[in-house]
Image (cartoon, rainbow, N blue to C red):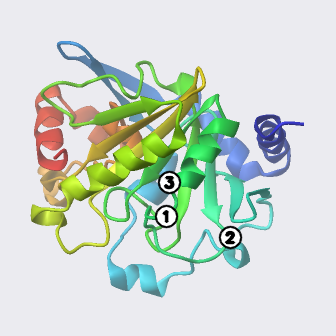
């Protein structure tokens, strides 16, 4: 049995045995969606109430320090099964999904969300899961568990447009593809050096989201450089508040809203303003 088949089997078992996860995946089928057209791409807005746990979470250091880490094995729900990857990661069904098939790949030890030294694992993961996009949210760029290293895997057919497709004038992204793993790693290393200026200087890593895919015997790595996690609308009060908290999936043009009022308020003009604030 190959690894991709193994995790699909895990998914189907969890849909049978874990009611919370099943309910949230079933709810995705009824999520409302609206679309805004731009010159050469479009942006989808999804209303997904189950994502409130992640997208509206408090991520300040005091809150993180006070709560139990939900990715550590001792604190996971009893129903949540795992599959080992490389002796370093636990593959888990995400009980609060964005996509019809959604996994979290968590480090089996508690360590911070820093990509340095782990890109090789991301490339290996994408190679054994060709039907999936592997994503990484930086600790200050959308990760709901900035204290515990993890990737996510989401089914590629969720995306109506290729992740690497340019979104000119709105979202900054840089892509590189190669059949040679070392070339991909070197490109990424050089890119990070280029980012280590201005607001990123002195931080443990530049603010970014990363996607990795493996198709036609090539890796495609796409990096979304960031300058802010949450836009001003998230912190506004009263009718001005729109609680958008963009992570990697949002940066691809699939904005996730957890409150119906926010879903209704989002216009094309709001989207332009949000991405101008957060995309570097």
> In this figure, which residue is indicated by the disc labeled 3?
119
Residue at 16% across, 51% down: 233
Horizontal and vertical percent position of residue 72:
65, 74
Name the secondary structure under disc 3: helix
Q: Say how many tags the image has.
A: 3
> In this figure, which residue is indicated by the disc labeled 1?
117
User: 233 or 118, which lies in front?
Assistant: 118
Horizontal and vertical percent position of residue 120:
55, 53
User: 177 or 240, which lies in front?
Assistant: 177
Disc 1 to disc 3: CB gap under 8 Å:
yes
- Position of residue 235 relative to residue 248, above or below, is below
Quadrant in the rendering for residue 228:
bottom left
Residue neighbourhood size for the residue with mark 3, other residues' Cα within 10 Å, grouped as few (<14), some (14–19), many (≥20): some
> In this figure, which residue is indicated by the disc labeled 2?
108
Residue neighbourhood size for the residue with mark 1, other residues' Cα within 10 Å, grouped as few (<14), some (14–19), many (≥20): few
Name the secondary structure under disc 1: loop
Disc 3 to disc 2: CB gap under 8 Å:
no
- In the image, is 276 to the left or to the right of 76? left
- Position of residue 75 relative to residue 149, above or below, is below
- Position of residue 92 relative to residue 274, above or below, is below
Horizontal and vertical percent position of residue 263:
31, 36
Whether residue 15 is visible to the viewer of this picture, yes or no, is yes
Q: Give the spatial CA distance, label 1 vs label 2.
A: 16 Å
């Amino acid at each position: 049995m190959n690894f991709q088949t193994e995790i699909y089997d895990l998914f189907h078992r969890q849909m049978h045995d874990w009611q919370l996860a099943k309910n949230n995946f079933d709810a995705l089928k009824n999520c409302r969606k609206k679309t805004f057209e731009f010159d050469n791409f479009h942006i989808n807005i999804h209303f997904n109430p189950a994502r409130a746990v992640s997208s509206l979470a408090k991520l300040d250091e005091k809150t993180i320090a006070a709560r139990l880490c939900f990715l550590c094995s001792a604190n996971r729900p009893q129903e949540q099964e795992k599959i080992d990857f490389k002796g370093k990661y636990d593959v888990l069904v995400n009980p609060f999904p964005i996509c019809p098939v959604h996994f979290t790949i968590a480090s089996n030890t508690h360590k911070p969300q820093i990509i340095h030294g782990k890109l090789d694992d991301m490339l290996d993961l994408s190679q054994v899961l060709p039907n999936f996009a592997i994503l990484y949210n930086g600790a200050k760029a959308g990760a709901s568990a900035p204290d515990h290293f993890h990737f996510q895997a989401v089914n590629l057919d969720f995306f109506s447009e290729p992740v690497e497709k340019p979104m000119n004038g709105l979202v900054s992204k840089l892509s590189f593809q190669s059949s040679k793993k070392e070339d991909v790693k070197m490109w990424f290393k050089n890119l990070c050096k280029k980012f280590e200026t201005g607001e990123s200087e002195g931080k443990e890593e530049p603010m970014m989201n990363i996607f990795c895919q493996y198709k036609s015997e090539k890796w495609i790595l796409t990096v979304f450089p960031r300058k802010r996690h949450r836009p001003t609308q998230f912190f506004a009060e009263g009718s001005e508040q729109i609680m958008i908290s963009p992570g990697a999936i949002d940066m691809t043009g699939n904005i996730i809203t957890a409150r119906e009022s926010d879903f209704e308020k989002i216009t094309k003009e709001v989207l332009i303003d949000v991405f101008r604030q957060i995309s570097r």
